[in-house]
Amino acid sequence: MIIAIDGPAASGKGTLGKRLSEHFGFAHLDTGLLYRAVARVMLDREIDLADRDAAHQVALNLDVTDLDDPRLRGAQMGEAASVISGYQPVRDALLAFQRQFAAQPPGAVLDGRDIGTVVCPDADVKLFITAASEERARRRHLELQKRGERIVFETILEDIRRRDERDMNRSSAPLKPAADAIILDTTHLDADAAFQAALDLVRAKSGRA
Ligand code: CDP
Ligand code: CDP
C-alpha cells in the first residue's frame, strides 16, 4: 500500500507522514530531504546553484542513506533545494530511488510535491495538505526557533511564498494536487487534529484500520 502526501512548504506533510507511517507500520520517506541533500552538497562544495550539469551529477551520486543531518532542515537548504529541484535531470536522477522505496512491503508513505502526480501516480491514497501561508510561516518560525535559527517571521513568510510560487509555476513536476487527491486544509487544525482527519480519510479510502 502506498500513501502519497503532497503540499506546499510547512503544511505539515512530514509530521503527518511520520505519524501515518507509524500507525500503519509502513516505511516513511520525506522526499524533500533528497532535494535538500543535493543542495547541501552544492553549497558545501561552493558550486553555483545555477549550474544544472553539476546539480545533475550531484543527484546521480547522492548518498541516499545519509538524510539524518539536522543541517538539511535549515532554511538555507530549503531555498537552495527549491532552485535545484526545478532541474528535470535532477528530478529524473532521484526518481528510481523514490519508486523503489514506495514499492516495499507492507507499505510506504512518501511526502513531497509530486508524489501523487509523478512518483506514485497509482498510490492507494493521495492527500494534498494545505494551510494558509501565514499559518505555515508561523509553524516554520516556531520550528526554526527551536533549532536555534533566529529568522524574523516576515522573512520566513516571504521565503515560503517565493518558494511556493516557484514550486507551483515550474515546468518540471509543478506543485499541484493530483486529480484524485483528497485536499485537507489544516489552517485551523493542530498536528493531532490533522493526523486524526487524515487517518479517517485513509481508512475510508483504503478500508484499512
Ligand atoms: O519542508 P518544506 O515543505 O519546507 O520543504 P521540503 O519538502 O523539504 O522541500 C524543499 C524543496 O524541495 C521544495 O521547495 C521543492 O522545491 C523541492 N521538492 C520537490 O521539488 N519535490 C519533492 N517531491 C519534494 C521537495
Ligand atoms: O513537511 P512540511 O514542510 O510540510 O511540514 P513539517 O516539517 O511537518 O512541519 C510543520 C510544523 O508544523 C511542525 O513543527 C509541526 O509540529 C507543526 N504542525 C503540523 O505539522 N501540522 C499541523 N496541523 C499544525 C502544526
Image (cartoon, rainbow, N blue to C red):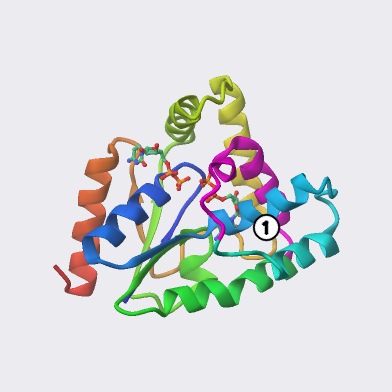
Q: Position of residue 78 (x, y in %)?
A: 61, 44
Is 68 on the left-hand or right-hand side of 191? right
Does the image show residue 76?
Answer: yes
Q: Position of residue 185 (x, y in %)?
A: 35, 46
Q: Is residue 78 magenta?
A: yes
| Number of numbered discs overlaid on the protein picture | 1
- The image quadrant of residue 67 is bottom right
Write the residue at 66% across / 37% down: 76
Residue reaching furthest to the left: 209
Three-letter residue code for mark 1: Ser
Is 138 on the left-hand or right-hand side of 20? right
Write the residue at 30% across / 61% down: 21
Question: Does mark 1's beta carbon lie closer than 8 Å to ligand 1?
Answer: yes
Is 127 on the left-hand or right-hand side of 39? left
- The image quadrant of residue 208 is bottom left
Q: Is residue 107 above or below residue 52?
A: below
Q: Which residues are magenta?
A: 66-88
Q: Is residue 99 above or below residue 67?
A: below
User: Circle 1 is placed at which residue position?
Assistant: 85
- The image quadrant of residue 28 is bottom left
Q: Position of residue 169 (x, y in %)?
A: 66, 54
Write the residue at 31% across / 68% down: 26
Report the front residue among 63 and 74: 63
Report the front residue among 194 and 42: 42
Report the front residue among 183 and 193: 193
Does the image show residue 3?
Answer: no
| Quadrant of the snapshot with the C terminus | bottom left
Q: Position of residue 178 (x, y in %)?
A: 46, 67
Q: Is residue 46 above or below residue 28?
A: above
Q: Main secondary structure of the magenta part?
A: helix
| Quadrant of the snapshot with the N terminus | bottom left
